[in-house]
Image (spheres, rainbow, N blue to C red):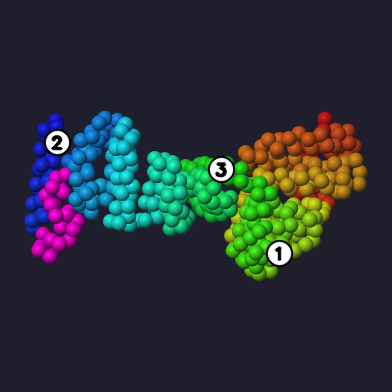
Amino acid sequence: MFKIMKLNTVLAIGLFIGSMNVHSLFAQDSLESKYGSDSVNCVMNNSLYYEFFKQWKATDFKNESWKDAIGPWRWVFINCPQSTINIFLHGESLLEELINSETDKELKEKHIDTLMMLYDNRIRYYGNEGYVLGKKGTDLYKLRPDNYEETYNILKKSIEIESINSGGQVIIYYFRAAEKMVKNEKSDKTLLVDIYDQTSDIIDKNLKKAQDADDTKAIANWEIVKGNIELSFEPYATCEDLISIYDIKFKATPEDVDLLKKITKILDKKNCTDSDLFFRATENLHQAEPSARSAELMGKMYIKREDYNKAIEYLLEAIKLYEDDNERADVHYLLANVYFQIKQFSNARAQCYEVLKVRPNEGKTYILIGDLYAASAKECGDNPLTEKIAYWPAVDKYYKAKSVDPSVEELATTKINTFSQYFPATETVFFYDLKKGDSYTVGCWINETTTVRTSD
């Protein structure tokens, strides 16, 4: 069988070389640069290593054919690296196996050097620098964990180039390398805060992209990356730490718009909005560069201070300025809660309906409408029946929430059980000439048709 394989390889090489002889003379220079100064040996060694590599791959990389592939692969890697990008793609797997199987420490280090050189040469001959640096940096972190500073610089450059196209593993190892920098006093905590801000933005955009495409695998992968970064950042994410880091910077340049955006974004994300720093930074940002985001933050700030009229003013401004439907829906939901606080139930419900136009299956919004109905029950009645009938449409909304959004099922069920106890008694319903199952339109500001039910 092996003789047949070698015969097929030789025939393939012969046919390839024969085809080269019919090329016109003007193509010889480009062929020589692609196949090196010894094109015959280049083609032969390419074919030899690839045959052994295929055998290895066919066994799910379990047999030892890779050992036979190493020699001819090394020849083409050194002598004609531009002949095919497969030299670099397959070379990663071959060198990884070689490194993992090597017991001699000195030789292992040399093999790691070769792998690093492979990535450098791949960039030199085939470009795609940002992506390849990501692979180089993650491998260097795993193989030489003490070289964290070099790893950090490689991955930093990769992410600067790739930005939103950066891979999840690259982001994770970038943060880990930076964390080692901080632990070994090569940098302070500010580095991790800045990287968290940078990478969170990349993660969130990729997660949204996956969600919009309903790509469950990508969603799961980015959720894992997000969780990993959040967990790693947690020890450095106390409000006290963040405020102490940014307060110095803010005092130095209180009008720096980029700094103000960073401060307000991370303090908001980490729920540090009670701080005076957040208030001052948000105010300065909105004055310097009014935007939907700064208006929303101003609204949140005034909610914290329980100045609801001011909060409404800024949230309405944010809704006008936002162009993205989902971002606008988030503010509508926030505004609905503000109106709830000041008992403007009709306005609150109107904001909920705006949310449902964008996200019709968002259970928490139906629950909020149910809460509005339940909260206004006594205000909407003037007798033993009418002061309890608002609980009927309230429970309807909780059932609706369960039916469209499994994530709120437990909360909705609890509310159903709680407020069903407040339904009017059977004798009360009978007294007002009603019976269970009748259709009934609840008046007041609610104006919804529901079904008569009793608490007993």
For label 2, count other residues whose C-alpha is less than 10 Å away and answer few (under 14), some (14-19) or many (20+).
few
- Disc 1 is placed on an element classified as helix
Residue beneath the point at 62% across and 38% down: 406
Which picture quadrant has residue 350? Answer: bottom right
For the point 14% across and 30% down, which residue is it? 1
Q: Hey, which quadrant is residue 425 in on the image?
A: top right
Whether residue 452 appears in magenta in the rendering, the answer is no
Q: Mark 2 points at which residue?
A: 5
The answer to which quarter of the image holds residue 387 is top right
For the question of whether residue 357 can be seen, the reply is no
Q: Name the residue under label 3.
A: 232
Position of the C terminus, as image quadrant, is top right
Residue 283: image tag: 1
Left or right, 31 with reference to 53 = left
Magenta span of residues: 23-45
**Foreground residue, 35 or 404?**
35
